[in-house]
Image (cartoon, coloured by chain):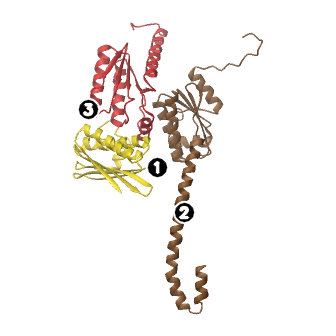
Chain colours: A yellow, B brown, C red
């Protein structure tokens, strides 16, 4: 049983839209209020990355339920320039656009599962998953 | 029981017994497995619920004075309990408008780096809500763990024991504890 | 969505009412810096009670505001960070280090008053008191 929502990202209004929709979906799916906030923050980070580096892309949400195990999967996808050195991008404090640069490493810390696939010139796909706590 | 009666019936014909057992064994295993898994899942669910209830009871956030909260932590802390503690504490800070929190970890046996990290996060999150945190009851082992994960202990206010921590907190809040005069003596 | 900025005595109070886009945040930063200069404010309070998410851009902007305000002689306090937002922030690694935070508007004002008093006392101790 799964449910999918897709949000196109082309402006900073879309970033807000994406995190609000993600939060709502998490709320409907029974995630705790604290987890909703964490999910919204992670979505905000990856959606903004799309905007900053690829100018446009898409964030999709999927709730996967298996018995009493439920998770929210977030996929942020773009056809942008790609990340040349993923390992370096995943290190704290690294960013080519200046500032704190906490986008990817920060989002990873918030989520239970995290994966980045990227090819220079082709694009980037970030997949993240948050499990609903059984007693939440 | 079934196996025994099979032996009794077919002990004379080893070939037949062998074939019957070949059929019987996987079926029996599957049955046993299904029952076992179902049983274990249900038990685990009940245990989780009970653990949750125990966690709630054993992590009280106490308001001792106005604007002062104490969080005594006892026992083993797993990541889930740590998270719950932090959430309760932060909500408590907001509800009680606490300016100082004393987290006492005298009763904590050991702390791995994950939980130590969590403690640091709790201190930082409390600060974002405008509260100062004093950690008391740090054992040498736990202090070592904190240093190992890169915590700058000079950044974290620590006091030896809970009593000292409360006094420090009162000092920060501007309280002064004065012994009561004996009745009949001049004030 | 423009954030309303009120002047209260020597302080500026910016009350965020709803979710802000990155552009809104940048606009808020520009507006505050402009007003701090124009009104020679001594303190800035940014009330984020209504924000249910604070990500790295929001934190960066708040730090910039605090930094730039200080260059112009004003202290900044961020107030109203929600418990869950605070928790998400520290997990994200955003600590707002070097920026004062308080529970709410009342606490924020008390903090600014205390800060100003400290500065006045310092100057008195140094034997000089500029026109306040």
Where does residue B87 sit, x and y in percent of width and height? 49, 38
Residue B168 percent location from the top left of the image: 60, 26
How far across and how far down the image is residue A131, in percent?
42, 51
Compared across the picture, whether C121 is left or right of A5 comes to: right
User: In the rendered picture of this protein, how many numbered marks are placed on residues?
Assistant: 3
Check disc 2: other Cα within 10 Å, few if <14, some if 14-19, many if 20+: few
State the CA–CA distance, disc 2 to disc 3: 55 Å
Nearer to us in this view, A125 or C9: C9
Asked whether A105 or A57 is in front, the reply is: A57
Secondary element at tag 2: helix
The residue at 45%/17% (across/down) is C115
Foreground tag (3 vs 1): 1
* Placement of the N terminus of chain B among the 4 image quadrants: bottom right
Q: Chain ID for label 2? A: B
Chain holding disc 1: A
Residue A133 marker:
1
Residue at 45% over, 16% down: C113
Residue displayed at 50% across by 43% down:
B83
- Is residue B26 visible to us here? yes
Q: What element carries label 1?
A: loop
At label 1, counting other C-alpha atoms closer than 10 Å, the crowd grade (few under 14, some 14-19, many 20 or more) is some
Cβ–Cβ under 8 Å for marks 3 and 1? no
Which numbered dot is residue B39?
2
Tags 2 and 3 both on a single chain: no
């Amino acid at each position: 049983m799964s449910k999918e929502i897709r949000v196109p990202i082309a402006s900073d209004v879309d970033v807000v839209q994406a995190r609000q929709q993600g939060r709502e979906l998490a709320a409907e799916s029974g995630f705790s209020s604290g987890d909703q906030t964490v999910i919204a923050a992670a979505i905000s980070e990856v959606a903004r990355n799309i905007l900053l580096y690829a100018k446009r892309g898409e964030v999709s949400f999927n709730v996967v339920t298996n018995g009493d195990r439920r998770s929210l999967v977030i996929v942020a996808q773009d056809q942008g320039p790609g990340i040349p050195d993923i390992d370096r991008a995943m290190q704290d404090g690294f960013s080519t656009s200046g500032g704190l640069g906490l986008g990817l490493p920060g989002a990873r810390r918030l989520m239970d599962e995290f994966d980045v696939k990227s090819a220079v010139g082709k694009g980037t796909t970030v997949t993240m998953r948050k499990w609903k706590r059984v007693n939440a | 029981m079934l196996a025994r009666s099979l032996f009794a019936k077919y002990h004379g014909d080893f070939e037949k017994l062998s074939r019957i057992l070949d059929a019987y064994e996987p079926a029996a295993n599957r049955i046993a497995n299904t029952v076992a898994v179902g049983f274990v899942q249900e038990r685990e669910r009940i245990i989780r619920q009970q653990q949750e209830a125990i966690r709630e009871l054993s992590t009280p956030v106490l308001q001792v004075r106005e604007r002062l909260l104490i969080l005594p932590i006892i026992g083993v802390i797993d990541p889930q309990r740590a998270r719950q503690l932090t959430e309760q504490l932060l909500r408590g800070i907001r509800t009680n408008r606490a300016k100082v929190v004393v987290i006492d970890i005298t009763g904590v046996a050991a702390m791995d780096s994950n939980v130590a990290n969590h403690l640091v996060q709790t201190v930082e999150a409390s600060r974002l809500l405008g509260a100062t945190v004093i950690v008391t009851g740090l054992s040498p082992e736990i202090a070592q763990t904190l240093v190992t994960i890169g915590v700058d202990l000079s950044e974290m206010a620590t006091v030896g024991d809970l009593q000292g921590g409360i006094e420090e907190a009162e000092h920060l809040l501007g309280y002064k504890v004065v012994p009561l005069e004996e009745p009949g003596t001049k004030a | 969505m423009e954030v309303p900025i009120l002047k209260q005595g020597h302080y500026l109070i910016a009350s965020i009412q709803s979710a802000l886009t990155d552009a809104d945040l940048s606009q808020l930063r520009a507006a505050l810096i402009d007003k701090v200069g124009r009104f020679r404010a001594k303190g800035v309070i940014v009330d984020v009670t209504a924000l249910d998410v604070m990500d790295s851009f929001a934190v960066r902007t708040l730090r910039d505001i605090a930094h730039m305000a200080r260059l112009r002689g004003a202290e900044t306090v961020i107030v109203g960070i929600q418990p869950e937002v605070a928790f998400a922030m520290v997990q994200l690694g955003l600590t707002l280090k070097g920026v004062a935070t308080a529970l709410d508007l009342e606490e924020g004002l008390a903090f600014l008053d205390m800060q100003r008093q400290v500065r006045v006392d310092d100057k008195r101790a140094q034997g000089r008191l500029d026109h306040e």
